[in-house]
Amino acid sequence: MAKSLNRYFQFLDSSGEAQPSGRLWYPAADIYKTPDGWLVKVELAGVSADDIEIEVHGNQLRILGSRKDKTCAAGGSVQQLEITYSRFEKALEFPGSIEKAKLEHNFEDGLLMIFLKTA
């Protein structure tokens, strides 16, 4: 079991520096149909609003960005890393084109709320 858990950790190299995992992570998302379009909620704890990109192509909504570890103090050493600090990507498909939808968003308490107004 320990081996299967270890694949989620970032390990230290011989220099003692934390190494980025280099793999994408895929945040959780909820999609709601509303009377005037769609509401998408994406869980992005620890991500800065400046590190998020939102793209619309046809019937697909893509959310991209990165989560960076900004809390490690100088002179400190890492004991354990379980949170993935790397680029993330989430692609969501809708039943029809959303290119002409009015896109509004807000980011608060680790949740990105995207409003796609089609009506």
Image (cartoon, grey):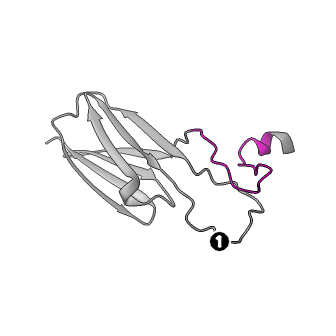
**Crowding at mark 1 (Cα within 10 Å: few <14, some 14-19, many 20+):** few
Q: Quadrant of residue 58?
A: top left
Q: Is residue 17 magenta?
A: yes
Residue 17 located left or right of residue 101 = right
Locate residue 51: give its quadrant.
bottom left
Q: Which residues are magenta?
A: 4-23
Point 55% across, 42% down: residue: 25
Tell whether 96 sits left or right of 26.
left
Name the one closer to the observer, 117 or 71: 71
- Would you say 79 lies left or right of 25 here? right
Most prominent secondary structure in the magenta stretch?
loop
Q: Residue furthest front?
A: 15
- Give residue 67's position: percent from left, percent from top: 51, 53
On screen, 43 above or below 62?
A: below
According to the picture, the residue beneath numbered tag 1 turns out to be 74
In the image, residue 45 lies in the stretch drawn in magenta? no
- Residue at 61% x, 50% y: name it: 84
Q: Position of residue 33 (x, y in %)?
A: 30, 43
Q: Nearer the viewer, residue 72 or 14?
A: 14
Helix, strand or loop at disc 1?
loop
Q: Is residue 1 visible?
A: no
Q: From the top left corner, tell me how far across and down residue 114 is, in percent.
A: 31, 50
Q: Can residue 70 be seen?
A: yes
Q: Quadrant of residue 18?
A: bottom right
